[in-house]
Image: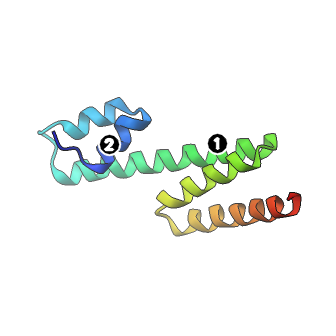
């Protein structure tokens, strides 16, 4: 059975309702794309929340990892700039600590 990339992301990262919707043959391709877009935004938000939480706890390597994941799936130019700025600051902090 072949799965689309958004569906695989949902199956791996735990959004079963969206995964069921993606596999539903009654959905039009545009509706599937919209569902995938919403899933990507929620995943990006989750990674960003994790990164900020890790940074506040002093777990800088984990924070960096989450920032990079959020950056890799970000589609909004404004959020991209914010994530990049926070990641740059964190990388400077890591270089200083090393």
The secondary structure type at the circle numbered 2 is helix
Q: Residues within 10 Å of mark 2 (few under 14, many from 20)?
A: some
Q: Which mark is residue 35?
A: none
If the image is split into quadrants, where does the C terminus sit? bottom right
Q: Position of residue 57 (x, y in %)?
A: 80, 40
* Residue 24, position as x, y percentages in the image: 17, 36
Estimate the spatial distance between the alpha carbons at disc 2 and disc 1, rounded to whole Å. 21 Å
- Mark 2 lies on residue: 8
Tell me which residue sits at (24%, 40%) in the image: 22
Whole-percent x, y for residue 90 in the image:
76, 59
Task: Give coordinates of residue 78: x percent, y percent.
Answer: 57, 67
Identified at 34% across, 30% down, the residue is 16
Query: Is 7 situated left or right of 95 in this image?
Result: left
Give above or below for 78 relative to 7.
below
Quick one: which residue is furthest to the left in this view?
A: 26
Position of the N terminus by quadrant: top left
Question: Along the line of sight, which residue is nearer the eye, 71 or 41?
Answer: 71
Q: Which residue carries the number 1 mark?
A: 50
Tell me the quarter of the picture where residue 86 sits: bottom right
Q: Residues within 10 Å of mark 1 (few under 14, many from 20)?
A: some
Which of the two labelled residues, at mark 2 and mark 1, occupies the earlier sequence position? 2
User: Which secondary structure lies at badge 1?
Assistant: helix
Q: Is residue 52 above or below residue 98?
A: above
Residue displayed at 32% across by 30% down: 17
Q: Nearer the viewer, residue 20 or 95?
A: 95
* In the depicted structure, whether residue 32 falls above or below residue 93: above
């Amino acid at each position: 059975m072949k799965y689309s990339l958004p569906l695989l992301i949902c199956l791996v990262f735990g959004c079963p309702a969206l995964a069921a919707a993606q596999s539903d043959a009654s959905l039009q391709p545009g509706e599937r794309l919209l569902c995938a877009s919403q899933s990507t935004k929620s995943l990006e938000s989750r990674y960003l929340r994790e990164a900020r939480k890790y940074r506040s706890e002093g777990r800088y390597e984990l924070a960096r990892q989450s920032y990079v994941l959020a950056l890799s799936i970000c589609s909004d130019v404004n959020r991209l700039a914010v994530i990049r700025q926070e990641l740059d600051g964190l990388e400077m902090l890591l270089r200083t600590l090393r």
